[in-house]
Image (cartoon, rainbow, N blue to C red):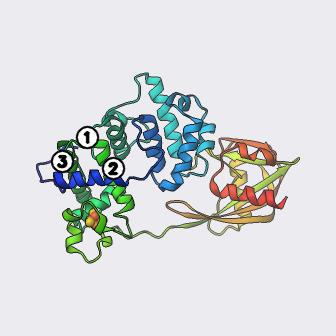
Amino acid sequence: MKSESHPSALSSAAVRKLSKWYDQNQRKLPWRNTRNPYRIWISEILLQQTQVETVRPYFLRFIKAFPTLASLAAAPLDKVLKVWEGCGYYARARNLHRAAKQIVGEGKGFPRRYYDLMKLPGIGRYTAAAISSIAFQEPVAVLDGNVERVLARVLCERRVVKNTLVQKRLQRAADKVMQAAVAAQIKPGDLNQALMELGAIVCTPRRADCAVCPLKNSCAARRKLADVTILPRKTPAKEIPHYQVTAAILRKNGCLLITQRPHDGMLGGLWEFPGGKQHKGETLAECLLREIREELGIEIEVGELLTSVNHAYSHFKITLHAFFCKPKRGRLQRIGVADFHWVKPAELNRFAFPKADRVIIQRLLHTR
Ligand code: SF4
């Protein structure tokens, strides 16, 4: 993260104004005002892909369940996934668990340096910079979506923001701002949080409150553009595919069959009603017969439709069709699943399910 000798995008005076603004305007969040690297790490991982207001209760729940690094490392993965349930992007929870085990196993304490943090699963440049600067005051600049937007506007960068050259330019600018902050005796963690906070509450994607912005006198977009929100420029969004997916509600002796997804894929380790994606030319019933045969090695009878649930993931959407089914013949095998259980409806809450399956459970309990 070395920077060349370009002038900073922000003068020392502008950086001081930003720091003062942050002192006076930062939101009160449960992970603020701590130097505890474990708590900062958990909050940063939760904040990836998830809005602050959604993260707040999950953070409190996670810290209550696993108050220390050692408690997280000692917990079974199933319990971690259950606490994470509903927050999405479950690879984050699996990586937190793996990293906690790795840190405890190495016995050298929580890594303090940017490059050591990057060696942990699930920690990329942004998260390593955030933890090392906020917890340990290492002067490393973060470049998350909020900082990217603020700097693209301050510099009036009109090229597509994900362009490699633009990313390099913005990282250089962020590094220079960090140097200016250190020279002005502003803590690296505070500078990073101030820029992120400005992007979150003043210089937002759809609205920029330039009149109250501490950077208004340094901002090129404000001087040059009638509407600053046209920046940063994005690549046009691709059309999101929409899949039809089936799920079997198999019942036997008052119990329901649930299966665990393989640990290494999407939603890995979560439980669900077995089924899968419809192939071209198949009816939904044919899809379900094939999926159950492929995953569990049994033949079933497909009955009435219970419900269809729409759900959007980051790169695709699904409609999940859940059918009541009966086992016909064959012995259950773990072919395409990590595990399976027959459980009573009242026991379903002990397991972590994806959101769409949770909707099925609610409808199921409601129609009994
Ligand atoms: S002056 Fe306006 S556009 Fe520029 S950084 Fe501040 S809020 Fe964003």
Residue tagged by mark 1?
139
Where does label 3 land, which residue? 180
- Whether residue 67 can be seen here: yes
- Whole-angstrom CA distance, mark 1 to mark 3, is 11 Å
Q: Which residue appears at 33% of the width and 50% of the height?
A: 23
Q: Amino acid at mark 1?
A: Pro
Residue at 49%, 32% in the rendered image: 100
Q: Are marks 3 and 2 in contact (CB under 8 Å)?
A: no
Q: Is mark 2 within 8 Å of ligand 1?
A: no
User: How many numbered circles are shown?
Assistant: 3
Give amino acid for label 3: Ala
Determine which quarter of the picture holds residue 205. Answer: bottom left
Q: Is residue 54 above or below residue 158?
A: above
Residue at 73 percent of width and 63 percent of height: 286
In the rendered view, would you say 221 is above or below 93?
below
Question: The N terminus appears in which quarter of the rendering?
Answer: top left
- Give SS at disc 2: helix
Q: Secondary structure at mark 1?
A: loop
